[in-house]
Image (cartoon, grey):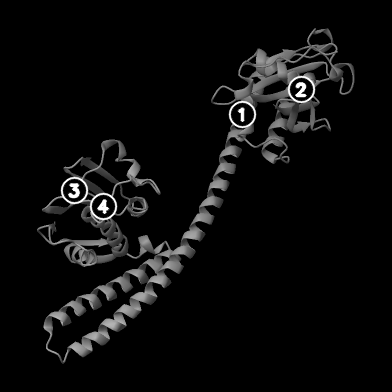
């Protein structure tokens, strides 16, 4: 009977670490095969292998000079390597070693006599397995061979880590593609669903305006005019959103020369701003070159929130602007209900709500600020919030100039 294999003190954690690489029972890969071949040639042994140890077996990711894919763990030399050394384990003659003399791999095929193995220890200190070389005769390695085998072992571990990152990236890309496809379909459907009633409102308002032309009711005609103007603006926004949902690259490529205060005025006209809240624009008009639809969406969200979460009898929203280097910098401050400091980072996360009712007794859906953050980052900028409870909130964001 062979000597029972030793078990690492951190075996459960080690097995979890090994499982996280999703490498067991995968097909042969050239990168690993080449490193194994180099190990065999450098150490001048007929057999070389990359061995990974789970709870019951040693499985070979790559093996040169033998035709076997795994062996029981109790027969694995590598089970000793990962416990007894962090450097290299060398067995010159297994027939004379009490640990392995009765091992079936020594007494029978493949008749192991010489063994040298370097443990594959990841960055968290868990030994996943080893890079080994084997011979059927007593043998020793030179200092240079030992040094080279250790270098190859590091390269094997690098390939294992790289393979894990590539696998994770592929999974992430697949999930992102599925999400983007869903969002695109949702945006397209939502845009069409919004356009239909908006078009009806516009047509009805225009018909009503024609009838009012002969009544002399100038006040009603003015109100209908506002409805027509807002409907046309909303239809334009919906069309722009639809274009961007179908071709996201337009967000960066479709840069326009725009007047900031003019853009802000058109955004405020789309918001139900109570008479008790005053919105102050920058004192001087500024000309920007930027994605107008992205900037509109950012301001629409931030200003809507500033209005919704203002509980003061006299609400104030100040919008400031300055250019600095390659960036346009904006600041939107209000005297509303404020946000607790512990939530200032959380508010930009997807679907996060703070269970706070707005001035209309409604809760948010947690998508607005998340969308704002995505748009700002898409414009190669950043955003953060500052706030004090019951004193107000300041949103500061930047977007890169189109130079």
What is the C-alpha distance between the residues marked 2 and 4? Answer: 63 Å
Tell me the residue at 82%/13% (across/down): 2
Q: Which residue is mark 2?
A: 73
What is the C-alpha distance between the residues marked 1 and 2? Answer: 17 Å
Residue 16 is tagged as 1
* In contact (CB < 8 Å): disc 2 and disc 4: no
* In contact (CB < 8 Å): disc 1 and disc 3: no
**Quadrant housing the N terminus:** top right
Q: Position of residue 298 (x, y in %)?
A: 29, 57
**Quadrant housing the C terminus:** bottom left
Dot 4 or dot 3: first in sequence order is 3
Q: Which residue is mark 3?
A: 336
Dot 1 or dot 2: first in sequence order is 1
Choose mark 4 or mark 3, whichever is in front.
4
Say what secondary structure mark 4 lies in: loop
Choose mark 1 or mark 4, whichever is in front.
4
Q: In the displayed orientation, state which residue is furthest to the bottom.
A: 214
What is the C-alpha distance between the residues marked 1 and 3? Answer: 49 Å
Residue 358 is tagged as 4
Q: Position of residue 360 (x, y in %)?
A: 25, 56
Say what secondary structure mark 1 lies in: helix
What is the C-alpha distance between the residues marked 1 and 4? Answer: 46 Å
């Amino acid at each position: 009977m062979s000597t029972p294999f030793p078990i690492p003190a951190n075996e459960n954690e080690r097995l979890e670490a090994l499982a996280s690489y999703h490498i067991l029972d995968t097909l042969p890969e050239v990168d690993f095969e080449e490193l194994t071949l180099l190990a065999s040639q450098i150490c001048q042994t007929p057999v070389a292998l990359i061995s990974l140890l789970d709870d019951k077996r040693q499985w070979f990711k790559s093996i040169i000079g033998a035709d076997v894919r795994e062996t029981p763990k109790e027969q694995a030399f590598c089970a000793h390597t990962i416990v007894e050394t962090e450097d290299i384990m060398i067995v010159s003659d297994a027939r004379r070693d009490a640990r392995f003399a009765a091992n079936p791999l020594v007494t029978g095929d493949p008749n192991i006599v010489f063994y040298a193995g370097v443990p594959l220890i990841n960055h968290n200190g868990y030994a996943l397995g080893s890079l080994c070389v084997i011979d059927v005769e007593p043998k020793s390695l030179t200092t240079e061979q030992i040094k080279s085998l250790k270098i190859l072992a590091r390269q094997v571990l690098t390939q294992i880590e790289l393979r894990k990152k590539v696998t994770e990236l592929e999974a992430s890309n697949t999930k992102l593609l599925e999400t983007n496809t869903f969002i695109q379909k949702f945006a397209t459907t939502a845009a069409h669903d919004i356009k239909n009633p908006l078009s009806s409102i516009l047509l009805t308002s225009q018909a009503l305006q024609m009838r009012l032309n002969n009544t002399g009711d100038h006040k009603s005609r003015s109100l209908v005019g506002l409805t027509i103007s807002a409907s046309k603006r909303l239809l334009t926004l919906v069309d722009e959103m639809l274009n961007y949902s179908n071709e996201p690259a337009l967000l960066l490529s479709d840069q326009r020369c725009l007047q900031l205060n003019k853009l802000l005025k058109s955004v405020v006209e789309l918001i139900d701003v109570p008479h008790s809240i005053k919105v102050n624009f920058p004192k001087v008009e500024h000309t920007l070159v930027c994605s107008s639809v992205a900037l509109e969406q950012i301001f629409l969200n931030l200003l809507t929130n500033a209005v919704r979460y203002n509980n003061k009898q006299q609400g104030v929203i100040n919008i400031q602007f300055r250019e600095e280097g390659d960036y346009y910098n904006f600041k939107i401050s209000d005297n509303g209900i404020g946000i607790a400091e512990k939530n200032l980072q959380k508010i930009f996360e997807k679907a996060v709500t703070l269970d706070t009712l707005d001035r209309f007794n409604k809760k948010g859906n947690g998508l607005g600020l998340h969308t704002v953050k995505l748009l700002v980052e898409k414009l190669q900028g950043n955003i953060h919030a500052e706030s004090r409870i019951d004193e107000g909130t300041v949103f500061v964001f930047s977007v890169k100039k189109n130079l």
